[in-house]
Amino acid sequence: MAEDSIAKSKLGSSHRLFLPLMIGACISFVLVLFVIGYMTLTTPEPRPDDIYTIMKNAKSKADADKAGAGNDDDETAASSEDTTMLPDGTFDFSRYSYYSFPLPFVANLSNGKGLLTVEIAIATYGDTLTSERIMKQLETFNPKMRSAINFKLSDQVLDDVNTVAKRNKLAKALLSEVRLIVDGQNPTDPSAITDLHFVKFVLSGT
């Protein structure tokens, strides 16, 4: 009788230990799977010196290709300016920025036969400092540019703007006016203002 009681108590103890052991084993299994998945699916970011090495090698290869193709010094200098290394070791890439006039231009054609409504955006290209500088200049010269553009638009007749080719010619003429105002008559550096775009071009009353 006493032996049966001892056996039952041992069996009960083993049942009580079995459940915690199973829970602990399941939790451990889940944690192991999580760690394996995390290590497998996540990739550590490359170190700054690795990025520097990659960019340096890419730039060297590009310079070698340009030298092999026989490009002139001006083109090589322009390509080297596309990327600027900052004091903290990071790179500042040149990019396009756009300055849009807040209000459209509205002008009567010079012969009085039609109304021209135009929205204009100016494209610039350069690194962060260049973009900030040129945007401030465009803001400063906004009234003077609007005046020059309005005079140029008012000087047009229908035959000057009735085809895409003629409108492109007008855009180039307006770009020259803008560069003259912002860069001056004798700029020392190439202009950061690259293009002038007609965002909207409407002829009415013709």
Image (spheres, rainbow, N blue to C red):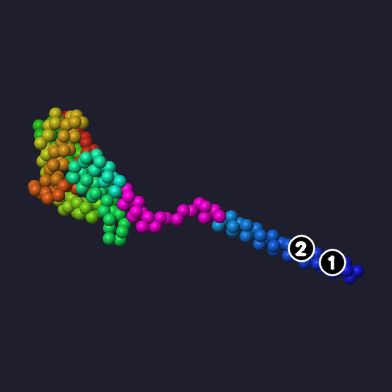
Crowding around mark 1 (Cα neighbors within 10 Å: few <14, some 14 to 19, many 20+) is few
Instruction: Pick the residue in front: 175 or 69.
Output: 69
Q: Was residue 40 drawn as part of the magenta stretch in this picture? A: yes
Residue at screen point 28% across, 53% down: 92
Q: What is the residue that sits farthest to the front in this orientation?
A: 68
Residue 156 screen position, x and y as percent = 12, 34
Quarter of the image with the C terminus in it: top left
Residue behind mark 1:
7
Q: Is residue 155 magenta?
A: no
Please name the amino acid that badge 2 sits on.
His
How many labels sit on residues?
A: 2
Q: Which residue occupies 25% across, 41% down?
A: 68
Give, as a single range, the part of the protein colored magenta. 36-58
C-alpha span from label 1 to label 2 = 12 Å
In x, y percent, where is residue 146?
15, 45
Q: Residue at x 14, y 49 (%)?
A: 189
- Disc 2 crowd rating (10 Å Cα; few below 14, some 14-19, many 20+) is few
Q: Which residue is mark 2?
A: 15
| Residue type of the residue flagged with mark 1 | Ala
